[in-house]
Structure formats: C-alpha cells, structure tokens
Amino acid sequence: MNKLEIKHLSKTYPNGVKALDDLSLTIENGMFGLLGPNGAGKSTLMRTLAMLQEPQTGEIFFNGVNVVSNPDQIRSVLGYLPQEFGVYPKVSARNLLDHIAVLKGISNRNERKDQINFLLQQTNLYEHRKKAVSTFSGGMRQRFGIAQALLGNPKLVIVDEPTAGLDPEERNRFLNLLSEIGEQIIIVLSTHLVDDVLDLCSKMAILNRGKILCQGNPLELTASL
Ligand code: ADP
Ligand code: ADP
C-alpha cells in the first residue's frame, strides 16, 4: 500500500494570490479525484506534488519519505502528465519515449525497449510508434502523455485535467486506460468535471480557493452538488 501525505501546504504567488491555503490531505492506492473550479489551486497542487514547484510552508511525504528534501528518491517513482503536454517534436513516438526513459534513468536498452513496447500497446499507439508526436490528434497526445508518465513503473502518477480538449470517444478511451493501470499505485487526477471523478475515482476531494472543502466517496459527495 502506497501513501501520500500532504500536510499544511500553503502557496501565495508574488501577486498576492493564495493558491494553496493550509491544505492537508492523505491519499492511498487507487484513483483519487481532485475536483474544483478554475482557479481553485488544482494545478498549483499538482505541480507541487510533481516537485516542479516548492511549497512555501508545509510538507509532503510519500511512503514516509519527505518529498521536498529527497527529490531524487521521489522522482524515480513519480509520473506526471501536465495539463498541457506541450512537447510535440518531429521525433517519432517510440524514439521520444526512449529519450524520456533515458532521462528517467532506465539505463538498460532492452529494459527500455520492453517497457516502451508494452506502454505503446497499452495506449493503443503501437501502430503509430514510428510517427512524429507532432502529427498526433489530441486524444493520441493524451495517451502518449500517459505512456511517458508510466515509464519506469511509477508508484505515484499525477494527471492534471487530462480530459480537457478530448472528444467524448477519446475521453472514454483515455479514462478506460487510466482505470486499467490499476489499483496498485496512487493516481491523482485533477479535473473541473464531476463526470471524470464519478466515472473513475474511488475517492475524491473538492478543492476551492486553495482549501479542501470535503472529501470521501464520489457518489455520496457529488449527490449534493
Ligand atoms: P486551477 O488549476 O484549479 O485552475 P491554479 O493552481 O492554476 O488553479 O491557480 C490558482 C490560483 O493561482 C488562480 O487564481 C491563478 O490565477 C493563480 N496562479 C496560478 N499560477 C500562478 C502564477 N504562476 N502566478 C500568479 N498567480 C498564479
Ligand atoms: P488552469 O487552467 O489550471 O487554471 P491557469 O490558466 O491558471 O491554469 O494557468 C496557466 C499557466 O499560467 C500556469 O503556468 C500558471 O502558473 C500561470 N498563471 C496562472 N495565473 C497566473 C497569474 N495570475 N499570473 C501569472 N501566471 C499565472
């Protein structure tokens, strides 16, 4: 069982916007939905969990390890799909995954090859492996994004508004893929869409103005919305 503990996280931007306000949350294995309107602080929290941004105050522990003071230990078990995975180079999907795998420290060539082929199949991109990511549709890019996030068998995967810009069919395919990844790890998914959480998550929290309003079972929590 993996455990992510977020304790008293605060972040105020230089312009005075308080994006995170003494936020505490504990998340265990499975899909966890973070629901909130635009400006609630979701991306700020997700970037902080992905260690791209430091909190001003507060601490994050993953399986007991302090994330902020041990970045390298955490980076090796972390996968991140940003809101806009904006790298669409002319490199083929397969080669781009290989570059990212090298950056993630997977030094064995055969191990990289096996993982990449497996993920390309899981994301239904195998037949497109030799095409440039820049030629991919929105849905294919999201699936590519999740493939790169899953390289290295992460135990914690952070996905920020993954369904934005997908048509209904692409969205369903993408959500099915996420749910297949299994209950063995923690996936934190941020969204402003109630349906994303209802369709997918076993637990959820509602975020507004940098604070957790409530948390629990999605069906029960959203019944009152
Ligand atoms: P969400 O992802 O829920 O829309 P964000 O974390 O992006 O929320 O933003 C929370 C608040 O912080 C918003 O008011 C946003 O405008 C502000 N904000 C986000 N990033 C920055 C930044 N780099 N500088 C200043 N304000 C920011
Ligand atoms: P979201 O769609 O998650 O709300 P935003 O549109 O708030 O994202 O933010 C997009 C980008 O702009 C982020 O990198 C964020 O840090 C930055 N940003 C958001 N609000 C501000 C702001 N008020 N001042 C400066 N940068 C901001």
Image: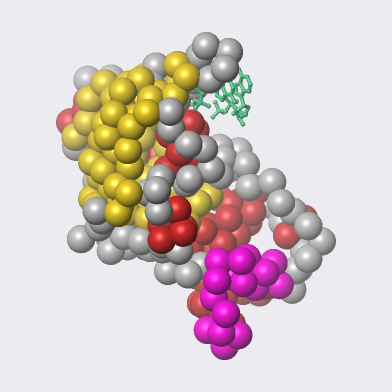
**Magenta span of residues:** 95-111
Point 48% across, 36% down: residue:
54
Residue drawn at x 47%, y 19% is 12
Give the image quadrant in which the ligand numbered 2 is located.
Answer: top right
Residue 191 seen anywhere in this rendered image of the structure: no
Residue at the spot 50% in from the left edge and 14% down from the top edge: 17
Residue 211 placement (x, y as % from top left): 32, 21
Quadrant occupied by the N terminus:
bottom left
Residue shown at 27% from the left, 34% from the top: 7
Residue 151 is a magenta residue: no
Residue 225, above or below 188: above
Q: Looking at the image, which residue sits at the far right?
A: 90
Viewer-proximal residue, 204 or 3?
3
Q: Picture coordinates of residue 188 (x, y %)?
A: 37, 45
Q: Say whether residue 119 is left or right of residue 91.
A: left
Q: Is residue 158 above or below residue 93?
A: above
Q: Is residue 97 left or right of residue 204?
A: right
Tell me where residue 50 appears, x and y as whole percent. 47, 46
Please indicate whether residue 211 sits to the left or right of residue 119 in the image. Answer: left
Which quadrant of the figure contains the C terminus? top left
Toward which corner of the image does residue 201 lie, by quadrant? top left
Q: Is residue 105 magenta?
A: yes
Q: Main secondary structure of the magenta part?
A: helix
Would you identify the image quadrant in which residue 156 lies?
bottom left
- Left or right of 78 on screen, residue 97: right
Q: Hey, which quadrant is residue 84 in on the image?
A: top right
User: Which residue is more in the foreground, 1 or 34?
Assistant: 1
**What's the coloring here?**
secondary structure
